[in-house]
Image (cartoon, helix red, strand yellow):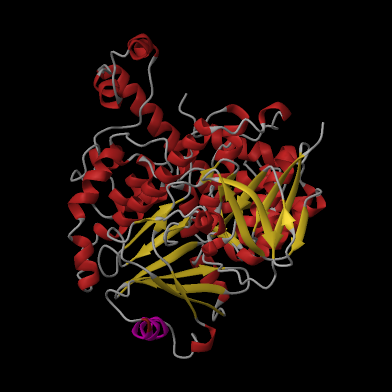
Amino acid sequence: MEKKKIVIIGGGTAGASSLAFLQKKLGHICDIEMITSHEIPIIGVGEATVGNINVFLEMCGLDPEKTCLGDARGSIKFAVHCKDWLRQDHSYFTPIGLFSMDYHDMVSFNRPIKEYWESWCGLKLALTGKSPFLKQEHWDTPLPKMWREYAYNIDAGLLGEALIEHGKEMGAKVIDKKVTEIKIIDKDKIDYIVTEDGERVDADFFIDCSGFKRLVPNACDYEPKSWKSENPNDRAWATRIDYIDRVAELPYLSCVECEAMEAGWRWQIGLRDRIGTGYVFSTDYISEDDALKEFKNSFEEGRVKDEDCKLIKFNTECYEKQAGANWITCGLSAGFIEPLESTSIFFMHNNLIAFLSLIKQNKLPQDVQMVSIGAWDTSQLDVNYFFMWDQEKIDMYNKYTIDTFDCTAKYVGAHYAFNKNNKSKYWDDWAKKRKQYIDHGSEVMSYKHQHLFFGRPAFSLLSAGNELGSEIDGWDLSKVWITPRQEEAYKSGALVDERAILEDRTPKEYLQALRTILGRLTHRRWLNDVFCDYAYNLIDQYKWLDHVSELRDSDIKESRQYIESITTMF
């Protein structure tokens, strides 16, 4: 059978991810080719990732730790740290994890917030300065060798290089040219593309990774949907700085610091050799020059230099059509939202996973929650399924991707709207939207929108961090599952929603569920406490790379499965 051809338009992290992923998954039935120019600068807005990157890299045939900590000169990321958002000298976190104390239990039993944060085992490692890797001399102890509840802070450029090299090693082709024209027919079908030297390039399918140039959407005359009225942020100053005290700063920045500023927020991302930092702000409230001055003054004198700062202009916007007759968009070409929750790279990977899932099994990816490590389908694609890309799949893809973006925009907005810091007019104007975001959060806490990235687990973190208590509806709903007694009623539709399921529980079933949940929490906490005693310190996290080759794949898989097993309810 003659192979089909997929052409990736553009490079960057999106193009590199597409190359490695598609070559691994479709290389047996398709020729994968990327056309990109080394002359086109890479934006590189996001260097922090979410937990699902582990699964994505494994799907590409790569070891996540070796790739991110080694090739990409990265570091472990356990959480996002929101500093001074609620009020001055107050901190809360949005950690990566599989299981924790439920918000319902924290409020019902009036547990201290410190206990809630420490129930997130990855965050507990961060707060105690520990890595998620067991020291080699303790590998014989009855503990998992790694505590896989983390993501990475990475050099996005180096990650892209590693992905491209891996894709090429598997057989993908990279052509160093600029794409100058996209020929569209039948409203949304790419007939062919043209490179800078006039060459016509034909393909069966195209992946647009052209960044803010957005070559395919522009060729189709599409206009992006704007969220400007919801989120006024439109600029970011970005730079790289050296460590002053790496021994202290690197472990601290395993929770990416996001500090409230006059008209936005400042990020600090700790990599292996340096810190990536910047200031996201709104020009409705502060000028570019004043923002740069405030940004520089937030550090020690001379640490941030004017000539090293790059101004990034953006709008919070997304295309409602991210797929057409023979193409999809991936990365910045699909849309952009500020990097508060490190979602830029996730959006790229989720679009690719959604595409693969639709052409393979005519359905969208299974639920992937923001706090999880993800569980995307990793099976091979059947040859006969690939080019069943019809209007039904296009419509499903477009709805899913715009819904994912919208739920992310609302989640990001809630961080601002729940503030009580009285820091400036910028923050006061955000606080006026509090009810709007309380209402949305109440829907999510009531188990609505659980098929999207920022579901109840994510809003539980914001509710806890912003001390919402019972102000947010749905807080009184605990973890939900169907008991054997309820199965028939659930299947018949008699139990119409999560509240009906929970209210149908008998007192005995309620106590049994509570005992199971608290038992799991206690088991995880005790095991995590012991793990902390035997783990490398965060500053020594790279020692894992020196010894990981001595582990069998089965050893690593067993460790990951064990962490998941002590999370499963029944």
Q: Is residue 294 magenta?
A: yes
| Residue at horizontal 34 percent and vertical 10 percent from the top | 492
Instruction: Tell which of 533 and 570 is nearer to you.
Output: 570
Between 147 and 61, the one nearer to me in the picture: 61
Q: Position of residue 517 (x, y in %)?
A: 39, 31
Q: Report the residue at 76% width, 60% height from top.
A: 175
Left or right: 456 as drawn, with respect to 257: left
Instruction: Look at the magenta stretch and give its main secondary structure.
Output: helix
Q: Is residue 502 above or below residue 524?
A: above
Q: How many numbered marks are there?
A: 0
Q: Position of residue 493 (x, y in %)?
A: 31, 14
Q: Based on the displayed image, in which of its 4 quarters is residue 37 positioned?
A: bottom right
Any part of residue 52 in sight: no
Residue depicted at x 26% and y 17%: 504
Percent position (x, y) of residue 349? Answer: 57, 48
Start-end of magenta stretch: 289-298
The residue lying toward the viewer, choosing from 259 and 549, is 259
28 on left or right of 57: right
User: In the displayed structure, would residue 502 be above or below residue 173?
Assistant: above
Quadrant for the N terminus in the image:
top right
Q: Is residue 155 magenta?
A: no
- Whether residue 114 is visible: yes
User: Which residue extends farthest bottom?
Assistant: 302
Q: Residue furthest front?
A: 186
Q: Where's residue 111, x and y in %? A: 28, 45
